[in-house]
Image (cartoon, rainbow, N blue to C red):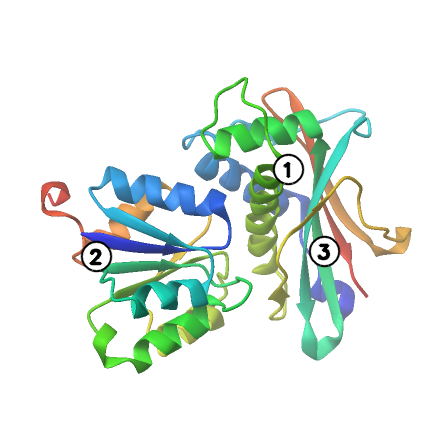
Amino acid sequence: MKALVIDDSRTMRRIVTTVLKDLGYETTEAGDGQAALDVLEAGDTFDLACIDWNMPVMDGLTFVTKVRENRDWRSLTLMMVTTESEHGQIVRALAAGAHEYLIKPFTPDALRDKLELLGLLPVEETV
Amino acid sequence: MIAGTLTVGREQILAISQDVFAAMIDDGETIVFERFGDVNEPADPIVAWVDMTIGGLGIGARAVVRTERTVADALTRALLVMDADEVVGPEDLVDAFGEIANVVGGNVKSLLAAHAVLSLPTVAGEAPTMAEHQFLQQIPLDWRGHTLVVSLWSLS
């Protein structure tokens, strides 16, 4: 399975990709929403995108909205991974088209649980 | 009204800091505690902060994390899985230490009584100039025998 990890912080991208790689994912990183859109427009396909909210150039909510506007990317599962933990923000993200929401800081188990909920655990990790 | 909007307790800041360090740095173990007694100002400080702006009210808060450069280096090595003797470059330091302030500040923001917009983190060698009346809250922390101080300031 393939994941696109979108965060302006290299530190946070490392944390997320480490967990995903341990679960068996191939990962690609992008530093903002626009860079992530560029990756998708280049034709790369992914099962999952983990998306920070607050980023320069293009924020995560705008990225989610743009992905949902393109029918070619309908199969991409979108998970916000962010410090934005207020109920109103979660509702906004889900309304824009995000499938799941993980609040920073998170444990590896919390990320794994979200992926299991989404049916996105690689086969060897599924219990 | 303003004071109530920005009220966040020391215990809440401590709990957030413990969660951040346990999840991001210390493999789930809580080893950050409140540090009691005198806290000296860092000789070679590194400061990271994020702003939370409540647009409708024209007010906001700033969460600041400060420590010694050597401690920020150690945190960066832990976050980026670097060797113990590896030299920490300025880009890595800004990214890693700034992300700590970002996650602490983002969680503090969720405790404010009104919706606020979070800024991107800023990292510098000295704290931004703040007046005494802007001070809201501060808690010194102990991480592996080192001192970090998390403080909250009003932007109004």
The amino acid at mark 2 is: Leu
Residue under circle 1? B90
- Indicate left or right for B126 with A46 as reference: right
User: Dot 2, how many residues are within 10 Å of its Cα: few (below 14), some (14-19), or many (20+)?
Assistant: few
User: Rounded to the nearest whole Å, what is the CA distance between mark 2 and mark 3?
Assistant: 36 Å
Label 1 secondary element: helix
User: In the rendered structure, are the residues bearing label 2 and label 3 in contact, judged by CB atoms less than 8 Å apart?
Assistant: no
Tell me the residue at 50%/29% (across/down): B78
Nearer to me, A96 or A59: A59
Residue B71 visible in image: yes
The amino acid at mark 1 is: Pro
Nearer to me, A9 or B24: A9
| Pointers 2 and 3 within a single chain | no
Tell me the residue at 33%/74% (across/down): A67
| Pointers 1 and 2 within a single chain | no
For residue B62, the mark is 3
Label 2 secondary element: helix
User: Dot 3, how many residues are within 10 Å of its Cα: few (below 14), some (14-19), or many (20+)?
Assistant: many
For residue A117, the mark is 2
- Indicate left or right for A77 with B69 as reference: left
Q: How many marks?
A: 3
- Quadrant that contains the N terminus of chain B: bottom right
Q: Compared to B121, does B112 lie above or below?
A: below
